[in-house]
Amino acid sequence: MSIEYALVAASFLLLVSIVTSKVSSRLGIPALLLFLVVGMLAGSEGLGGIYFDDPLLAQFLGVASLAFILFSGGLDTQIDDIRPVLRQGIALATIGVFLTATLVAVVAYTALDFSLEESLLFGAIISSTDAAAVFAVLRGKNVGLKGRLKPLLELESGSNDPMAIFLTVGMITLIEHADRPVLSLVPMFVQQMALGALFGVLIGHGITGLINRLRLEYDGLYSVVTIAAVMLAYGATTVLGGNGFLAVYLAGVVSGNRTFIHKRSLKNFHEGLAWLMQIVMFLTLGLLVFPSELVPVIPEGLLVSIFLMVIARPLAVFVTLARTRLSWQQKTFIAWVGLRGAAPIILATFPLVAGLARADAIFNLVFFIVLTSVLVQGTSLTPVARWLGVDTPAPPRRAYPIELIPGAGVKNDLVEIVIPDHSPVAGLRLVDIQLPHDTLVVLIGRDDDLVIPSGATALEAGDTVLVLAEKDSLPQVRATLCGVDAAA
């Protein structure tokens, strides 16, 4: 195929994927499912007739894409939001993943023609979740989640891939080196997580400091700097024996919670780049699979899918969160939200690249389970959330005509604060509200309008207030407007 035809085919697939993402939000179907279907239709057994059978290239594209997706997710993660659920999120991302992998390995060893090592590998591959698909569906249906469910699920999905990757790589190592003891994975785990956390924090601090000091003549180059930071975080950490995905995610979290110039535009850039990476990744994985090879694994795939959705994931969630104050409705929803997504399919290419004996069977089973999970769980999220009573109307995302571009050392920040129904300031004029002296209410979003405030403007419940204030004063501002204790 010539370069021109390849570019035409790539552009066509991208445009089709973008259109299907619009359709997916209206139908309540996760976009990743439609991206996979587009890739399968474009493959050698589909309408496109594109032959693709290169697991190594698919793994490379998948790993690179996942790194940029995790960095973008980290940029959007606010430490103030996840701090109250930090213990639960880390527990789900580690203990929860381990329990899920173990339970799936038991059923695989019992019911499938897998050895013990292959069963443990299969369980590790399928153990992580993809909450990005969940929130895409909920946003499409204008559904939010009550309490701390949203930050908890975001934290789990952003941080559980490193554990699944460690288990997968560890099991492949044990299979390839049969004389190596299982306990050798313990120091390997400590090393990977410690180095991943260390390099992630260091690179997150380093990249924001560098951006603030470079003073580049062309604003577009700042996005190139952050791209280089993602590649450095993953590549250098992995080469030095750490977990590159953990480093990338933490680098994003650290960067997103610090002040640097062009922060909003860079976050928007990485959000768009993450979508591009998702499309490329799912299209590639869709091209890699041969649909005819999925048919023979349907009985085994359905067995494992049902076990995973009904027993393994719920049991892992309820055991992990047993000592928390979450209600059974919240735990049940967390269990049902355990969608399998891109990460398991990418991890399923690892045995293919390693040349393991049952690699093809594992890949086809994982692919089928992901399809089943997305079809069943993904399409039922909204009714399940409403049935359990954990849903709430999603706050609208507004586009404001102004943007704060802080320089190095600037102490001010521009934030959105939603006035809740119980707020003591609802109905009060701005002049009557005791806000810190260094605070300015810039704009008020009310229904579909933007209100330019004055001292006589009265706030209403449901208003989205755009506030400019010093960072040290923001807790007091939130406490005043939301009616909560500033120390909470």
Image (cartoon, helix red, strand yellow):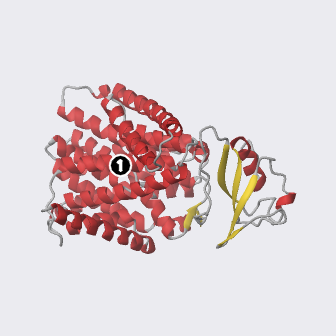
Residue 69 in the figure: left or right of residue 447: left
**Total labels drawn:** 1
- Residue found 36% across the figure and 71% down from its top: 20
Element type where label 1 sits in the image: helix
Q: Which of 79 and 188 is in front in this view?
A: 79
Note whether residue 116 is visible: yes
Relative to 152, residue 287 above or below: below
Relative to 142, residue 344 above or below: above
Residue 82 in the figure: left or right of residue 250: right
Quadrant of the image for the N terminus? bottom left
- Residue found 57% across the figure and 47% down from its top: 78
Quadrant of the image for the C terminus? top right
Note whether residue 291 is visible: no
Disc 1 crowd rating (10 Å Cα; few below 14, some 14-19, many 20+) is many
Q: Which of 309 and 70 is in front in this view?
A: 70
Residue 402 in the image, given as x and y percentages of width and height: 62, 59
Figure quadrant of residue 392: bottom right
Residue 4 in the image, given as x and y percentages of width and height: 18, 64
Residue 351 in the image, given as x and y percentages of width and height: 20, 44
Q: Nearer the viewer, residue 137 or 414?
A: 414
Figure quadrant of residue 390: bottom right
Mark 1 sits on what residue? 66
